[in-house]
Amino acid sequence: MSAVKTLRGIWRTFFWLVREEWGEMDHKLLKIVSGAISLVIAVAFWYFLFRGF
């Protein structure tokens, strides 16, 4: 099997797994995104607060 066919098979498997898990993850996606945004806001707040010291 050539390297291109192997990479194509890995790529197809990856997208198949992502598509399969997307239905289960759909309700969790909002929580993950809001948690990531909250983390970035908290880090920025503490960075700007303690940068002045």
Image (tube, rainbow, N blue to C red):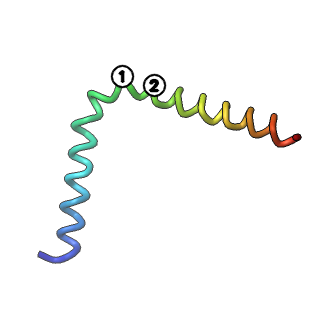
Indicate the quadrant where residue 26 lies.
top left
| Quarter of the view holding residue 3 | bottom left
Amino acid identity at mark 1: His
Per the rendering, the mark at residue 30 is 2
> Would you name the residue on which mark 1 appears?
27
15 and 42: which one is in front?
A: 42
Look at 81% across and 38% down and name the residue there: 50
Q: Is residue 45 above or below residue 52?
A: above
Q: Is residue 21 above or below residue 34?
A: below
Residue at the image point whose x is 27% and y is 29% from the top = 23
**Residue 24, position as x, y percentages in the image:** 27, 27
Residue 17 in percent (x, y) is at 22, 44
Residues at marks 1 and 2, CA–CA distance in whole angstroms: 7 Å
Question: Where does residue 31 sit, x and y in percent of width and height?
Answer: 46, 24
Looking at the rendered structure, the number of numbered marks drawn on it comes to 2
Quadrant of the image for the C terminus?
top right
Q: Is residue 19 above or below residue 29?
A: below
51 vs 34, nearest the viewer: 51
Which residue occupies 67% across, 31% down?
A: 42
**The residue tagged with tag 1: helix, strand or loop?**
helix
Q: Which mark is residue 45?
A: none
Q: Position of residue 8 (x, y in %)?
A: 22, 64
Residue 27's quadrant in the figure? top left
